Image (spheres, rainbow, N blue to C red):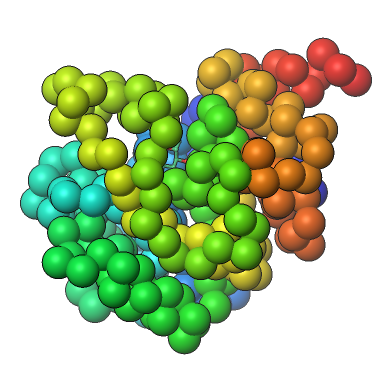
Amino acid sequence: MNIIQCNDSKEVALLSYRIFKEQLIKKPNSTLGLATGSTPILLYNELIKGSQLNEISFKKVNIFNLDEYVGLNSEHKNSYAFFMKEYLLNFIEIEDNHFHIPNGTACDLIEECHRYNNLLSSTKIDLQLLGLGENGHIGFNEPNTSFESTTHLVELTENTRKNNSIYFKSINDIPTHAITMGISNIINATKILLLAIGENKAEAVYNLINGPIDVKFPGSILRNHPDVTIILDKEAATLINKVK
Ligand code: GLP
């Protein structure tokens, strides 16, 4: 694993932008795996700037998002589909049918997991972006999810719902379930880039790097992947630095 420590979140965004730029220059029709949450927002700003400056282009790119809340449609301001439009898609040139995300309002959610998983199986993600949950989740793969899991329906833990509550009016508005790419879908990507920002991620980052590779901490599986880069700000790196 390649671990890079930055001074602040701006530097995290600039360095990760460089990795995306390299990828899109090397392969303009790349398949990207993207994430939501507060962590990638500054990177998405850089991707927008880069495409406006014609440094990069999304015209031939396909995007697969990690996950979506059950019960929220793409017009709901808390859905991840809406998040992606608001923070990236509305500002780049990408073919409508090149953006993929699970449909959290499908009548048959299990069938929707199969549909999304089949789409993922028909391609290979060149570069997968990840954030990290405080409990070690990647996508919405909560602790004790099998490393062999494919796209599936999950019940969100109270911890995850609490951490994501800042985006909702009240904790009761937060969906209890989500559809997420499985761990095996994530691990299948050619290259993985995980970003962590802020002191609340320091313990999870420490466990990811030093703890056992165990389903109790889903992110630990990344240590078995041949091409993972982790970019951290100073706060997220606090505990790994203490140990040295
Ligand atoms: C959610 C998303 C994850 C994301 C995590 C961290 O649970 N499903 O993909 O990595 O939140 O979010 P944040 O970046 O806001 O800390």
Give the side of residue 150 with respect to residue 228, left or right. left
Q: Locate residue 131, reporting x and y percent.
A: 51, 41
Tag count: 0
Residue drawn at (57%, 71%), measured in percent from left and top?
Answer: 126
Nearer the observer, 124 or 234: 124
Q: Locate residue 78, reporting x and y percent.
A: 19, 40
Give the side of residue 196 with respect to residue 217, left or right. left
Nearer the observer, 103 or 144: 144
Nearer the observer, 4 or 108: 108
Q: Locate residue 169, reporting x and y percent.
A: 14, 22
Task: Using the rendered view, name the quadrant where residue 159 is placed.
Answer: top left
Nearer the observer, 109 or 204: 109
Residue drawn at (22%, 57%), measured in percent from left and top?
Answer: 104
Task: Using the rendered view, name the quadrant where residue 45 is placed.
Answer: top left
Q: Locate residue 58, reporting x and y percent.
A: 36, 69
Residue drawn at (38%, 39%), measured in percent from left and top?
Answer: 156
Q: Is residue 32 above or below residue 11?
A: below
The answer to whether residue 157 is seen in the rendering is: yes
Ligand 1 located in image quadrant: top left
Give the side of residue 141 with respect to residue 224, left or right. left
The answer to whether residue 15 is seen in the rendering is: no
